[in-house]
Image (cartoon, rainbow, N blue to C red):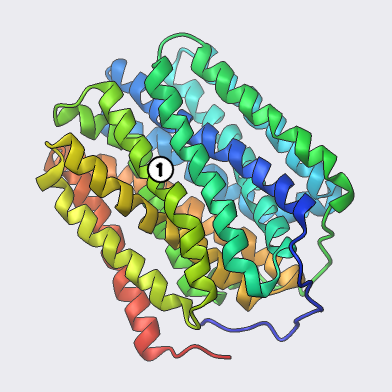
Amino acid sequence: MDQTSSRNPAIREEIHWPALIAAVSAITAVGIALGLGLPLLSVILEKRGVSPTMIGINSAMAGIAAMAAAPLSTLIAKRMGVVGAMVLSLVAAAASALGFYFAEALWMWFPLRLVFHGAITILFVLSEFWINTAAPPSRRGLVLGIYATVLSLGFAAGPLIFSVIGSDGPLPFVIGAGVILLAAVPILMARKENPVIETGPNHPFLRYVFLVPTATAAVFVFGAVESGGLSLFPVYATRTGFTESQGALLLMMMGLGNVLFQIPVGLIADRIGDRRRLLSLFAIIGLVGSLSLPFLIHNWVVTATILLFWGGCVAGLYTVGLAHLGDKLHGAELASANAAFVFCYALGMLVGPQTIGVAMDVAGHHGFAWSLAFFFALYVVLSLFRILLGPKRA
Protein backbone atom coordinates (compact mmCIF):
# COMPACT_ATOMS: atom_id res chain seq x y z
CA MET A 1 0.00 0.00 0.00
CA ASP A 2 1.02 3.60 -0.40
CA GLN A 3 2.97 4.56 2.67
CA THR A 4 5.59 6.98 3.85
CA SER A 5 9.02 5.88 4.90
CA SER A 6 9.65 6.34 8.58
CA ARG A 7 13.16 7.48 7.81
CA ASN A 8 13.12 11.03 6.51
CA PRO A 9 16.57 12.60 6.62
CA ALA A 10 17.33 16.26 6.41
CA ILE A 11 16.16 17.47 3.04
CA ARG A 12 17.70 20.32 1.06
CA GLU A 13 15.47 23.26 0.21
CA GLU A 14 17.30 24.48 -2.91
CA ILE A 15 17.60 22.85 -6.32
CA HIS A 16 21.02 21.26 -6.83
CA TRP A 17 21.69 22.51 -10.35
CA PRO A 18 24.86 20.56 -11.31
CA ALA A 19 23.12 17.29 -10.46
CA LEU A 20 20.00 18.42 -12.29
CA ILE A 21 21.96 19.27 -15.46
CA ALA A 22 23.83 15.95 -15.38
CA ALA A 23 20.65 13.93 -14.93
CA VAL A 24 18.84 15.93 -17.59
CA SER A 25 21.70 15.33 -20.04
CA ALA A 26 21.46 11.60 -19.51
CA ILE A 27 17.70 11.57 -20.00
CA THR A 28 18.00 13.73 -23.12
CA ALA A 29 20.21 11.07 -24.68
CA VAL A 30 17.74 8.39 -23.62
CA GLY A 31 14.82 10.28 -25.13
CA ILE A 32 16.45 10.91 -28.50
CA ALA A 33 17.81 7.37 -28.71
CA LEU A 34 14.41 5.81 -28.00
CA GLY A 35 12.43 8.36 -30.01
CA LEU A 36 14.62 7.74 -33.05
CA GLY A 37 15.47 4.09 -32.51
CA LEU A 38 12.09 2.48 -31.79
CA PRO A 39 10.29 3.63 -34.97
CA LEU A 40 13.48 3.32 -37.05
CA LEU A 41 14.01 -0.32 -36.15
CA SER A 42 10.33 -1.18 -36.63
CA VAL A 43 10.22 0.42 -40.08
CA ILE A 44 13.36 -1.44 -41.14
CA LEU A 45 11.85 -4.75 -39.99
CA GLU A 46 8.56 -3.91 -41.74
CA LYS A 47 10.47 -3.28 -44.98
CA ARG A 48 12.11 -6.69 -44.59
CA GLY A 49 8.68 -8.34 -44.44
CA VAL A 50 8.72 -9.12 -40.70
CA SER A 51 5.20 -9.51 -39.21
CA PRO A 52 3.85 -7.10 -36.57
CA THR A 53 3.85 -9.97 -34.06
CA MET A 54 7.57 -10.62 -34.63
CA ILE A 55 8.29 -6.87 -34.54
CA GLY A 56 6.49 -6.78 -31.21
CA ILE A 57 8.50 -9.73 -29.90
CA ASN A 58 11.77 -8.08 -30.90
CA SER A 59 10.69 -4.73 -29.40
CA ALA A 60 9.66 -6.53 -26.21
CA MET A 61 13.31 -7.50 -25.66
CA ALA A 62 13.63 -3.95 -24.35
CA GLY A 63 11.39 -4.90 -21.46
CA ILE A 64 13.31 -8.09 -20.71
CA ALA A 65 16.60 -6.19 -20.70
CA ALA A 66 15.23 -3.46 -18.48
CA MET A 67 13.67 -5.90 -16.02
CA ALA A 68 17.03 -7.62 -15.68
CA ALA A 69 19.05 -4.39 -15.41
CA ALA A 70 16.82 -2.44 -13.02
CA PRO A 71 17.46 -4.56 -9.89
CA LEU A 72 21.21 -4.55 -10.66
CA SER A 73 21.55 -0.82 -11.23
CA THR A 74 21.97 0.22 -7.59
CA LEU A 75 24.45 -2.62 -7.00
CA ILE A 76 26.54 -1.49 -9.97
CA ALA A 77 26.37 2.14 -8.83
CA LYS A 78 27.53 1.18 -5.32
CA ARG A 79 30.62 -0.47 -6.82
CA MET A 80 31.46 2.03 -9.56
CA GLY A 81 29.76 5.18 -8.30
CA VAL A 82 26.77 6.76 -9.98
CA VAL A 83 28.85 8.76 -12.46
CA GLY A 84 31.03 5.79 -13.45
CA ALA A 85 28.02 3.53 -13.97
CA MET A 86 26.26 6.17 -16.09
CA VAL A 87 29.27 6.79 -18.34
CA LEU A 88 29.80 3.06 -18.89
CA SER A 89 26.11 2.72 -19.76
CA LEU A 90 26.37 5.53 -22.30
CA VAL A 91 29.29 3.81 -24.04
CA ALA A 92 27.45 0.46 -24.14
CA ALA A 93 24.28 2.07 -25.49
CA ALA A 94 26.16 3.93 -28.24
CA ALA A 95 28.08 0.82 -29.33
CA SER A 96 24.95 -1.32 -29.53
CA ALA A 97 23.07 1.43 -31.41
CA LEU A 98 25.71 1.29 -34.13
CA GLY A 99 25.58 -2.50 -34.03
CA PHE A 100 22.03 -2.58 -35.43
CA TYR A 101 23.27 -1.17 -38.73
CA PHE A 102 25.86 -3.91 -39.17
CA ALA A 103 23.59 -6.76 -37.99
CA GLU A 104 21.91 -8.31 -41.05
CA ALA A 105 20.29 -11.36 -39.45
CA LEU A 106 17.16 -10.84 -37.35
CA TRP A 107 18.46 -13.05 -34.51
CA MET A 108 21.38 -10.63 -34.00
CA TRP A 109 18.93 -7.86 -33.12
CA PHE A 110 17.81 -9.71 -29.99
CA PRO A 111 21.15 -9.54 -28.08
CA LEU A 112 21.66 -5.99 -29.37
CA ARG A 113 18.29 -5.00 -27.90
CA LEU A 114 19.33 -6.57 -24.60
CA VAL A 115 22.56 -4.55 -24.41
CA PHE A 116 21.05 -1.30 -25.65
CA HIS A 117 18.01 -1.29 -23.39
CA GLY A 118 19.90 -2.71 -20.41
CA ALA A 119 22.28 0.26 -20.59
CA ILE A 120 19.38 2.68 -21.10
CA THR A 121 17.66 1.25 -18.02
CA ILE A 122 20.68 1.88 -15.81
CA LEU A 123 20.72 5.47 -17.07
CA PHE A 124 17.03 5.80 -16.22
CA VAL A 125 17.37 4.46 -12.69
CA LEU A 126 20.46 6.45 -11.75
CA SER A 127 19.39 9.73 -13.36
CA GLU A 128 16.02 9.55 -11.58
CA PHE A 129 17.66 8.80 -8.26
CA TRP A 130 20.10 11.67 -8.82
CA ILE A 131 17.36 14.11 -9.75
CA ASN A 132 15.14 13.11 -6.82
CA THR A 133 18.04 13.80 -4.45
CA ALA A 134 18.53 17.19 -6.15
CA ALA A 135 14.87 18.22 -5.82
CA PRO A 136 13.46 19.84 -2.65
CA PRO A 137 10.02 18.42 -1.71
CA SER A 138 8.24 21.74 -2.21
CA ARG A 139 9.52 21.95 -5.79
CA ARG A 140 9.72 18.27 -6.70
CA GLY A 141 6.86 18.50 -9.19
CA LEU A 142 8.53 21.44 -10.96
CA VAL A 143 11.95 19.74 -11.09
CA LEU A 144 10.47 16.48 -12.36
CA GLY A 145 8.41 18.50 -14.83
CA ILE A 146 11.66 19.95 -16.20
CA TYR A 147 13.14 16.47 -16.28
CA ALA A 148 10.13 15.01 -18.11
CA THR A 149 10.04 17.97 -20.50
CA VAL A 150 13.60 17.32 -21.61
CA LEU A 151 12.85 13.60 -21.93
CA SER A 152 9.83 14.50 -24.04
CA LEU A 153 11.97 16.83 -26.16
CA GLY A 154 14.18 13.87 -26.87
CA PHE A 155 11.18 11.72 -27.81
CA ALA A 156 9.89 14.51 -30.07
CA ALA A 157 13.31 15.12 -31.62
CA GLY A 158 13.81 11.42 -32.39
CA PRO A 159 10.80 11.04 -34.74
CA LEU A 160 11.60 14.48 -36.24
CA ILE A 161 15.12 13.34 -37.09
CA PHE A 162 13.63 10.12 -38.45
CA SER A 163 11.15 12.00 -40.66
CA VAL A 164 13.99 14.06 -42.17
CA ILE A 165 16.70 11.44 -42.73
CA GLY A 166 14.54 8.32 -43.20
CA SER A 167 15.57 4.75 -42.49
CA ASP A 168 18.18 4.20 -45.22
CA GLY A 169 21.93 4.04 -44.68
CA PRO A 170 24.08 4.43 -41.56
CA LEU A 171 23.26 8.10 -40.84
CA PRO A 172 20.36 7.57 -38.34
CA PHE A 173 22.46 5.07 -36.39
CA VAL A 174 25.49 7.37 -36.32
CA ILE A 175 23.36 10.30 -35.14
CA GLY A 176 21.79 8.20 -32.37
CA ALA A 177 25.14 6.92 -31.12
CA GLY A 178 26.71 10.40 -31.26
CA VAL A 179 23.93 11.99 -29.21
CA ILE A 180 24.27 9.26 -26.58
CA LEU A 181 28.02 9.79 -26.23
CA LEU A 182 27.65 13.58 -25.95
CA ALA A 183 25.65 13.10 -22.75
CA ALA A 184 28.81 11.89 -21.01
CA VAL A 185 30.32 15.40 -21.07
CA PRO A 186 28.03 17.14 -18.51
CA ILE A 187 27.90 13.98 -16.40
CA LEU A 188 31.69 13.94 -16.09
CA MET A 189 31.68 17.69 -15.38
CA ALA A 190 29.33 17.05 -12.44
CA ARG A 191 31.34 14.12 -11.06
CA LYS A 192 32.01 16.03 -7.81
CA GLU A 193 28.25 15.99 -7.24
CA ASN A 194 28.24 12.19 -7.46
CA PRO A 195 25.39 11.08 -5.11
CA VAL A 196 26.19 8.40 -2.56
CA ILE A 197 23.91 5.38 -2.34
CA GLU A 198 24.05 4.35 1.30
CA THR A 199 23.47 0.81 2.46
CA GLY A 200 19.86 0.46 3.48
CA PRO A 201 17.61 -2.29 4.88
CA ASN A 202 18.03 -5.62 3.09
CA HIS A 203 14.47 -5.92 1.77
CA PRO A 204 13.45 -8.13 -1.19
CA PHE A 205 13.35 -6.17 -4.43
CA LEU A 206 9.69 -7.00 -5.12
CA ARG A 207 8.74 -5.24 -1.89
CA TYR A 208 9.49 -1.94 -3.60
CA VAL A 209 7.32 -2.84 -6.58
CA PHE A 210 4.25 -2.97 -4.33
CA LEU A 211 5.27 -0.37 -1.75
CA VAL A 212 3.75 2.57 -3.67
CA PRO A 213 1.45 0.76 -6.13
CA THR A 214 -0.26 3.84 -7.54
CA ALA A 215 3.12 5.07 -8.81
CA THR A 216 4.46 1.74 -10.07
CA ALA A 217 1.20 0.83 -11.84
CA ALA A 218 1.16 4.26 -13.50
CA VAL A 219 4.63 3.78 -14.94
CA PHE A 220 3.75 0.24 -16.04
CA VAL A 221 0.88 1.60 -18.15
CA PHE A 222 3.05 4.45 -19.42
CA GLY A 223 5.78 1.99 -20.44
CA ALA A 224 3.33 -0.28 -22.27
CA VAL A 225 1.70 2.58 -24.15
CA GLU A 226 4.92 4.45 -24.91
CA SER A 227 7.00 1.49 -26.08
CA GLY A 228 4.18 -0.21 -27.95
CA GLY A 229 3.03 3.06 -29.43
CA LEU A 230 6.44 4.18 -30.64
CA SER A 231 7.21 0.73 -32.03
CA LEU A 232 3.96 0.05 -33.88
CA PHE A 233 2.36 3.44 -34.54
CA PRO A 234 4.42 3.84 -37.77
CA VAL A 235 2.96 0.50 -38.94
CA TYR A 236 -0.56 1.60 -37.89
CA ALA A 237 -0.15 4.93 -39.68
CA THR A 238 1.00 3.40 -42.96
CA ARG A 239 -1.82 0.82 -42.86
CA THR A 240 -4.38 3.62 -42.46
CA GLY A 241 -3.09 5.49 -45.50
CA PHE A 242 -0.32 7.79 -44.28
CA THR A 243 3.19 7.95 -45.66
CA GLU A 244 6.23 7.04 -43.56
CA SER A 245 7.03 10.73 -43.10
CA GLN A 246 3.44 11.65 -42.12
CA GLY A 247 3.39 8.86 -39.52
CA ALA A 248 6.68 10.08 -38.07
CA LEU A 249 5.31 13.62 -37.82
CA LEU A 250 2.26 12.33 -35.94
CA LEU A 251 4.64 10.73 -33.45
CA MET A 252 6.41 14.07 -33.20
CA MET A 253 3.10 15.79 -32.32
CA MET A 254 2.61 13.35 -29.46
CA GLY A 255 6.12 14.14 -28.26
CA LEU A 256 5.48 17.86 -28.61
CA GLY A 257 2.47 17.52 -26.32
CA ASN A 258 4.75 15.91 -23.76
CA VAL A 259 7.12 18.87 -24.02
CA LEU A 260 4.45 21.54 -23.62
CA PHE A 261 2.52 19.92 -20.77
CA GLN A 262 5.09 18.49 -18.36
CA ILE A 263 6.15 21.66 -16.50
CA PRO A 264 2.50 22.79 -16.05
CA VAL A 265 1.67 19.25 -14.90
CA GLY A 266 4.54 19.39 -12.40
CA LEU A 267 3.37 22.75 -11.05
CA ILE A 268 -0.17 21.42 -10.65
CA ALA A 269 1.17 18.31 -8.91
CA ASP A 270 3.00 20.53 -6.37
CA ARG A 271 -0.34 22.08 -5.41
CA ILE A 272 -2.37 18.88 -5.10
CA GLY A 273 -2.40 17.06 -1.80
CA ASP A 274 -3.34 13.63 -3.22
CA ARG A 275 -1.55 13.13 -6.52
CA ARG A 276 -3.40 9.88 -7.15
CA ARG A 277 -6.40 11.90 -8.32
CA LEU A 278 -4.30 13.56 -10.99
CA LEU A 279 -2.92 10.18 -12.09
CA SER A 280 -6.47 8.83 -12.40
CA LEU A 281 -7.50 11.83 -14.52
CA PHE A 282 -4.59 11.27 -16.91
CA ALA A 283 -5.56 7.61 -17.33
CA ILE A 284 -9.16 8.58 -18.13
CA ILE A 285 -7.93 11.03 -20.79
CA GLY A 286 -5.70 8.33 -22.23
CA LEU A 287 -8.64 5.91 -22.34
CA VAL A 288 -10.90 8.39 -24.15
CA GLY A 289 -8.15 9.30 -26.62
CA SER A 290 -7.43 5.65 -27.43
CA LEU A 291 -11.10 4.84 -28.01
CA SER A 292 -11.50 7.84 -30.34
CA LEU A 293 -8.37 7.12 -32.42
CA PRO A 294 -10.00 4.74 -34.98
CA PHE A 295 -12.60 7.42 -35.77
CA LEU A 296 -10.03 10.23 -36.17
CA ILE A 297 -7.03 8.56 -37.75
CA HIS A 298 -8.06 9.26 -41.35
CA ASN A 299 -7.84 13.04 -40.81
CA TRP A 300 -4.21 14.01 -40.28
CA VAL A 301 -4.87 17.46 -38.80
CA VAL A 302 -7.50 16.27 -36.33
CA THR A 303 -5.37 13.27 -35.34
CA ALA A 304 -2.31 15.48 -34.82
CA THR A 305 -4.30 17.87 -32.61
CA ILE A 306 -5.72 15.06 -30.48
CA LEU A 307 -2.29 13.43 -30.14
CA LEU A 308 -0.81 16.75 -29.02
CA PHE A 309 -3.07 16.91 -25.95
CA TRP A 310 -3.33 13.16 -25.44
CA GLY A 311 0.44 12.69 -25.46
CA GLY A 312 0.97 15.36 -22.82
CA CYS A 313 -1.55 13.83 -20.46
CA VAL A 314 -0.23 10.30 -20.95
CA ALA A 315 3.32 11.38 -20.09
CA GLY A 316 1.90 12.88 -16.90
CA LEU A 317 1.55 9.31 -15.61
CA TYR A 318 5.34 9.13 -15.52
CA THR A 319 6.01 12.60 -14.12
CA VAL A 320 3.40 12.58 -11.37
CA GLY A 321 4.04 8.92 -10.57
CA LEU A 322 7.74 9.65 -10.01
CA ALA A 323 6.92 12.71 -7.88
CA HIS A 324 4.51 10.60 -5.82
CA LEU A 325 7.27 8.05 -5.27
CA GLY A 326 9.77 10.74 -4.22
CA ASP A 327 7.32 12.07 -1.66
CA LYS A 328 6.90 8.69 -0.03
CA LEU A 329 10.48 7.41 0.27
CA HIS A 330 13.96 8.78 0.97
CA GLY A 331 17.61 7.73 1.03
CA ALA A 332 18.52 4.12 0.27
CA GLU A 333 14.86 3.14 0.06
CA LEU A 334 14.31 5.78 -2.62
CA ALA A 335 17.19 4.35 -4.69
CA SER A 336 15.66 0.87 -4.49
CA ALA A 337 12.19 2.23 -5.20
CA ASN A 338 13.50 4.09 -8.26
CA ALA A 339 14.86 0.76 -9.51
CA ALA A 340 11.44 -0.83 -8.89
CA PHE A 341 9.79 2.11 -10.67
CA VAL A 342 11.94 1.54 -13.75
CA PHE A 343 11.41 -2.23 -13.41
CA CYS A 344 7.66 -1.66 -13.76
CA TYR A 345 8.30 0.67 -16.69
CA ALA A 346 10.34 -2.16 -18.24
CA LEU A 347 7.56 -4.65 -17.56
CA GLY A 348 5.25 -2.35 -19.47
CA MET A 349 7.79 -2.17 -22.30
CA LEU A 350 7.79 -5.98 -22.39
CA VAL A 351 4.01 -6.42 -22.35
CA GLY A 352 3.02 -3.40 -24.47
CA PRO A 353 4.60 -4.10 -27.88
CA GLN A 354 3.70 -7.79 -27.76
CA THR A 355 0.08 -7.10 -26.78
CA ILE A 356 -0.35 -4.39 -29.41
CA GLY A 357 1.35 -6.45 -32.14
CA VAL A 358 -0.86 -9.49 -31.47
CA ALA A 359 -3.96 -7.26 -31.31
CA MET A 360 -3.16 -5.83 -34.75
CA ASP A 361 -2.74 -9.33 -36.19
CA VAL A 362 -5.97 -10.60 -34.61
CA ALA A 363 -8.29 -7.56 -34.80
CA GLY A 364 -6.82 -5.69 -37.77
CA HIS A 365 -4.92 -2.43 -37.69
CA HIS A 366 -7.40 -0.81 -35.26
CA GLY A 367 -6.33 -3.42 -32.73
CA PHE A 368 -3.60 -0.85 -32.05
CA ALA A 369 -6.12 1.55 -30.50
CA TRP A 370 -8.17 -1.11 -28.70
CA SER A 371 -5.10 -2.52 -26.96
CA LEU A 372 -4.02 0.96 -25.79
CA ALA A 373 -7.52 1.48 -24.36
CA PHE A 374 -7.20 -1.83 -22.48
CA PHE A 375 -4.08 -0.64 -20.63
CA PHE A 376 -5.62 2.69 -19.66
CA ALA A 377 -8.82 1.01 -18.48
CA LEU A 378 -6.82 -1.24 -16.16
CA TYR A 379 -5.21 1.77 -14.50
CA VAL A 380 -8.48 3.68 -14.22
CA VAL A 381 -9.95 0.76 -12.26
CA LEU A 382 -6.88 0.42 -10.02
CA SER A 383 -6.47 4.12 -9.29
CA LEU A 384 -10.14 4.68 -8.52
CA PHE A 385 -10.09 1.63 -6.26
CA ARG A 386 -7.06 3.01 -4.38
CA ILE A 387 -8.66 6.44 -4.00
CA LEU A 388 -12.00 5.09 -2.81
CA LEU A 389 -10.87 2.17 -0.63
CA GLY A 390 -7.24 2.98 0.18
CA PRO A 391 -7.14 6.45 1.76
CA LYS A 392 -3.79 8.26 1.59
CA ARG A 393 -1.73 7.87 4.74
CA ALA A 394 0.21 10.79 6.10
Residue at point 56% right, 45% down? 150
Q: What type is the residue that disc 1 sits on?
A: Leu
Please name the residue that numbered disc 1 is placed on. Answer: 256
Q: Is residue 308 visible?
A: yes
Q: Say above or below: 322 vs 170.
A: below
Horizontal side of residue 144 vs 272, given as left or right? right
Give the class, few, some or many, for how many residues have Cα within 10 Å of label 1's Cα (few <14, many ≥20): many
Say which quarter of the image contains residue 248: top left
- Residue most extreme to the top: 169
Please provide percent x and percent y for residue 6: 71, 86
Give the structural element (helix, strand or loop) at label 1: helix
Q: Say above or below: 241 vs 304.
A: above
Horizontal side of residue 175 vs 330, given as left or right? left
Residue at point 51% right, 58% down? 263
Residue nearest the observer in this picture, 57 or 269: 269
Please provide percent x and percent y for residue 179: 62, 27
Please provide percent x and percent y for residue 37: 47, 29
- Residue most extreme to the right: 192
Residue at point 79% right, 71% down? 12
Residue nearest the observer in this picture, 55 or 376: 376
Say which quarter of the image contains residue 327: bottom right
Q: Say above or below: 359 vs 113.
A: below
Horizontal side of residue 48 vs 317, given as left or right? left
Residue nearest the observer in this picture, 264 or 161: 264
Residue at point 38% right, 53% down? 312
Please provide percent x and percent y for residue 125: 65, 53
Instruction: Name the quarter where the C terminus is drawn.
Output: bottom right
Total marks placed: 1
Q: Is residue 99 visible?
A: no
